[in-house]
Image (cartoon, helix red, strand yellow):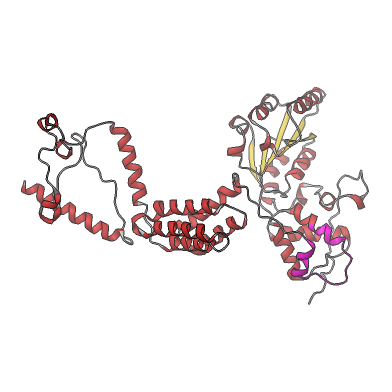
Amino acid sequence: MNDFFSLPNLDFISKTDKNQPEAKRPLADLLRPATLSEVIGQTHLTSDEGAIGRMVAAGYLSSLILWGPPGTGKTSLARLLAEAVSLRFEMASAIFSGVADLKKIFVKAQNCRAQGQQTLLFIDEIHRFNRSQQDSFLPYVEDGTIILVGATTENPSFALNAALLSRAQVLILNRLDEGALEQLLKRAESVKKCPLPLDRAARKALIFSADGDGRFLLNQAEILFSIKTDKAFTPDRLAFFLQKRMASYDKDRDGHYNLISALHKSVRGSDPQAALYYLSRMLVAGEDPLYLLRRLVRIANEDIGLADPRAVEQCLAAKQAYEFLGSPEGELAIAQACVYLATAPKSNAIYKAYKQSMKLAKESGSVMPPPNILNAPTDLMKKSGYGEGYHYDHDQPDAFSGDNYWPEGLPPEVFYQPVSRGYEKHLAERLAYWSDLRQKRKNKG
């Protein structure tokens, strides 16, 4: 049945800034939490045992970097932290502020500190400041003029200066889960004093579309509250009124690296279902299919190798098919290659052997190969012993001479050790056969 949900019985009351009439304030602003206990979805930080809970209890706040997806409460947390430890709150955005603006804030903070009032400076999108701008915070953080709280959606390890990171504690905010988003909707209904015009399936679809972003969810809910209707929305009807949310994904940022890492590890872990899911996530978000194909080729070499020599062939055939068919038909060939790799026997023996051989090659320098395997196109080279004692393998029993091919003074190393899976099982048997034959020839000599 498409019945409306009954109005939830909640005691939540918005206590945010009342400077403008409540009817004109955005829903997301109306629902800003008034205390840390009202912050949704971040109890790992705000509880008594959480990092923020402990700091507030101690009455001492260190500089912080709040790292998390959009719409998870970073700005609200910063405001509430300032209130909880009685700090003056100052806010700036890295998108709209420059060094000149920061200098004015620092001067004001110094004056306030001289009067006994410390400043919490909240910088939204702090990762958008360049290196020199980030450096400008350092002396004021060092001398206690400001407590810096920066918000970022990007990995601080890559986006922020090491010097700044060493002076701040990084706290990770969670993406809001289904339960947290449902709680937000109930609060919205309580404030608006009416239920959202959604049936159960549509409500679930609305929550799913938010992708963990509370602000986005409330903005969508605000549109729905403005619609006059006596019939509950179904998921299909809801799609006509609300725009589709694009996947959170930047090709050169965290979303990209997180998903490609998940894809690679799912294939390596022989889980074709998860591998297909992450492949699809990236394609839906607009990733270049050729980039994905390049990564699949890398996986074929690194994680499968000679356990299944056809793995690389499948990837290259998928590239050819994609280029021939185009999108979206050609993407099926990419999916086929992905599943082939995920279900193939795994071996990183070639990968490990290559790394070890490269290491020895760099360490051993320019040592000469043994003279017997060197060509001797001139008389001088022949007189110098080049090619002397070389045995042409095809003329030997079993087409195998057992000669030494390693430089003098450099003992033979074993780089490639095939696993007992897939085609490499046969290669292991072949190498063992040659090793035994080499030893017999050596003993005869």
Q: Is residue 63 visible?
A: no
Q: Residue at x 10, y 50 (%)?
A: 441
Q: Is residue 135 left or right of residue 291?
A: right
Q: Quadrant of residue 57?
A: top right
Q: Is residue 234 magenta?
A: yes
For this orientation, the residue located farthest to the left is 444
Q: Is residue 167 magenta?
A: no
Q: Which residues are magenta?
A: 220-242
Q: Residue at x 88, y 71 (%)?
A: 230
Of the 4 image quadrants, the one containing the N terminus is bottom right
Q: Nearer the viewer, residue 300 or 222?
A: 300
Q: Residue at x 18, y 53 (%)?
A: 434
Where is residue 21? Give x, y as percent.
93, 48
Q: Nearer the viewer, residue 123 or 117?
A: 123
Q: Residue at x 78, y 42 (%)?
A: 80
For this orientation, the residue located farthest to the right is 21
Where is residue 361? Give x, y as percent.
30, 36
Q: Is residue 376 visible?
A: yes
